[in-house]
Image (cartoon, grey):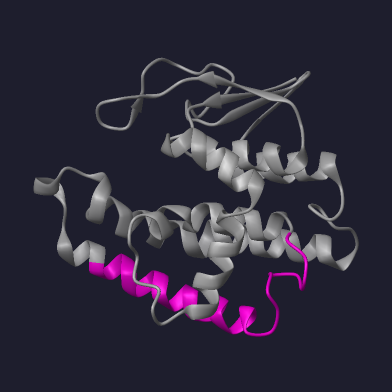
Amino acid sequence: MLKIHGIPRSRAFRCIWAAEEAGLPYEVVPLGFAPGFKLERPLPINPNNKIPALEDGDLVLFESLAINLHLAGKAGAPLMPAGDDASRVMQWTLWTATEVEAPVMRWGYNTYLKPAAERDAAEAAAGKEALDARLAVLEGVLAKSPFLLGDTFSVADLNLACVLYAPWLNGYDLARFPKVKAWLDACLTRPAAKRARQQREG
């Protein structure tokens, strides 16, 4: 059985969702945070001492999006397609990590994650401006098809939607991006996503 180290109210949510989509048995090994976003205890299997980490037999992985690619690969198509679409999965996963996650976190830390007294409105606005630029790219792609690779949901959609989940849940203004909003709604209300969200949202 897969072991996902972390808690649902962390990036481990992404891996829980992927395991649910893949139909793979898993257990969550609880490991949460102390004040200041530090782990409550060390996680020796991850040299970065961060969550999540995955144990799949003898294989240990860290980095949530890499874990998701591994889980999707175990499930195969349509979650992890072959051929050129597999390359597109990598493209969108790397785009998520390099282009999207940083502005999501910049906006999030200064909108709802930090205590109110520590939030910086200028930083939140800068995060939103940067994220809006990426959402404009995504809006153009989704004008051509309902999912990133065409008509079928894949791990490319999962990896991007799980990073955009927090803005979606916490009132990000998507009025300029109706295609993105419809796509996020479709991704995050899938049965597997709802099961993962139930663990995170209680």
**Which residue is depicted at the point 69% across and 25% down?**
26
29 magenta-colored:
no
Point 32% across, 61% down: residue: 171
Relative image position of residue 188 (x, y in whole percent): 56, 55
Is residue 135 one of those drawn in magenta? yes
Would you place residue 38 above or below residue 129 in this image? above
What range of the chain is rendered magenta?
Answer: 125-153
Q: Judge by depth and name the residue closer to the eye, 150 or 125.
A: 150
Q: Where residue 147 sits: x, y (%)?
A: 69, 70
Chief secondary structure of the magenta portion: helix
Residue 195 or 9: which is nearer the viewer?
195
93 or 162, which is in the foreground?
162
- Residue 43 screen position, x and y as percent: 50, 18
- Residue ranking furthest to the left: 117
In percent of width and height, residue 92 lies at: 65, 64
Residue at 47% in and 54% down? 165
Q: Residue furthest right?
A: 83
In the image, taking residue 201 as reference, residue 56 lies left or right, namely right
